[in-house]
């Protein structure tokens, strides 16, 4: 049961040898908790996101997979909210769109939304024993209802985690045909370059997207120079750009590490610059073009 997150369907219990009377007695004694329609948890209510996803898959039936935002959360390309989700999206090749509420105290505020999806083998991956829509498929679904910044973040985080690469481009274009999310996701697909799989933060990816869109020459990404890693390096110009995210680079100890790194690289003949996230986010195109002019690219 632990491997199944202590969750099982009625059919699985019966197949394991449980009789109807035994199931009824265990429900009465609390050894089983009814968490959703014909789905039970052994000895406890649902406690984890993984258990909730398994509940959703059992509710949706054979051939289903966690989809949309829920799949993006499971892949780690969209931030999961604390606690159990209020909505779990599941794609199923059978039946109609339907919504079901959880039955247990832990799931009383949770809705399982089952949508019709023609899921092919290449559309589905398994993570921790849970069937998920592959990241590219999840992004397509997610884009339909997400905001532009949310879509950009999820796309770049997928690149950062190396969950989205060249093979996913054609796949995504095909899946986007006629979909509501096409307008938001398609521009990022058009800007994809292999260097996006070398980024270490969404900020680095956002800077690169704007840089690519402006048509400037591609830098090396997270390249080691004189033994130190530089976020964006332009070897022909002997110029390195460090992109400082918020909290990590505001730590006093990290600030001292950053300062020492800059001094070391400058002592080796490089020109170095730091660009805080807040400065870039206030004027992305302006900041990108400023660096490009500084380097003689425009």
Image (spheres, helix red, strand yellow):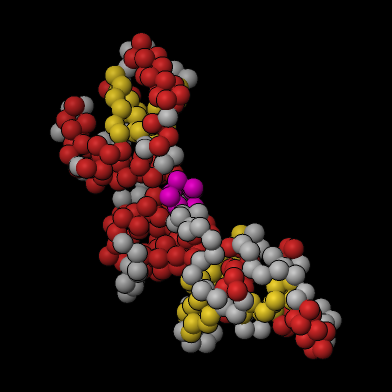
Question: Is residue 286 a member of the stretch shown in magenta?
Answer: no
Q: Taking the image as drawn, is residue 102 in sight? A: yes
What x and y, as percent, mark residue 135? 48, 60
Magenta residues, as a range? 157-164
- Tell me which residue sits at (35%, 33%) in the image: 244
- Tell me which residue sits at (69%, 65%) in the image: 5
The image shows residue 107, relative to residue 164, as above or below, that is: below
93 with respect to 239 (left or right): right
Say which quadrant the C terminus sits in.
Answer: top left
198 with respect to 243 (left or right): right
What x and y, as percent, mark residue 97? 46, 84
Q: Nearer the viewer, residue 29 or 146?
A: 29
Question: Is residue 158 a member of the stretch shown in magenta?
Answer: yes
- Tell me which residue sits at (32%, 17%) in the image: 270
Q: Say which quarter of the image contains residue 239.
A: top left
- Tell me which residue sits at (49%, 82%) in the image: 99
Q: Say which quarter of the image contains residue 57.
A: bottom right
32 with respect to 50 (left or right): right
Say which quadrant the N terminus sits in.
Answer: bottom right
The image shows residue 34, relative to residue 269, as above or below, that is: below
What x and y, as percent, mark residue 280? 25, 39
Q: Nearer the viewer, residue 120 or 251?
A: 251
Q: Nearer the viewer, residue 244 or 138?
A: 244
265 with respect to 80 (left or right): left
The image shows residue 148, relative to residue 269, as above or below, that is: below
Q: Taking the image as drawn, is residue 15 in sight? A: no
Q: Nearer the viewer, residue 56 or 134?
A: 56
What x and y, as percent, mark residue 95? 52, 87
């Amino acid at each position: 049961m632990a491997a199944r997150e202590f969750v099982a369907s009625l059919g699985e219990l019966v197949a394991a040898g449980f009789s109807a009377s035994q199931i009824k007695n265990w429900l009465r004694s609390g050894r089983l908790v009814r968490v959703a329609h014909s789905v039970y948890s052994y000895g406890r209510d649902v406690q984890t996101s993984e258990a909730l996803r398994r509940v959703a898959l059992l509710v949706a039936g054979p051939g289903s997979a966690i989809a949309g935002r829920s799949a993006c959360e499971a892949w780690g390309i969209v931030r999961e909210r604390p606690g159990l989700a209020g909505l779990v999206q599941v794609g199923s090749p059978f039946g109609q769109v339907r919504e079901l509420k959880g039955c247990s105290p832990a799931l009383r505020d949770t809705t399982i939304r089952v949508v019709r999806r023609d899921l092919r083998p290449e559309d589905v991956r398994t993570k921790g024993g849970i069937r998920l829509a592959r990241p590219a498929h999840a992004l397509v679904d997610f884009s339909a209802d997400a905001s532009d910044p949310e879509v950009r973040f999820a796309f770049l985080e997928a690149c950062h985690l190396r969950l989205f690469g060249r093979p996913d481009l054609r796949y995504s274009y095909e899946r986007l045909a006629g979909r509501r999310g096409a307008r938001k996701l398609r521009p990022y697909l058009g800007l994809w370059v292999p260097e996006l799989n070398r980024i270490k933060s969404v900020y680095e990816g956002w800077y690169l997207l704007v840089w690519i869109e402006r048509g400037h020459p591609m830098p090396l990404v997270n390249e080691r120079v004189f033994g130190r890693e530089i976020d964006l390096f332009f070897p022909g110009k002997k110029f390195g750009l460090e992109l400082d995210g918020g909290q990590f680079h505001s730590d006093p100890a990290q600030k001292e590490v950053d300062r020492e790194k800059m001094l070391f690289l400058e002592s080796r003949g490089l020109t170095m610059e730091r660009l805080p996230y807040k400065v870039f986010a206030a004027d992305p195109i302006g900041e990108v073009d400023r660096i490009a002019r500084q380097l003689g690219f425009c």
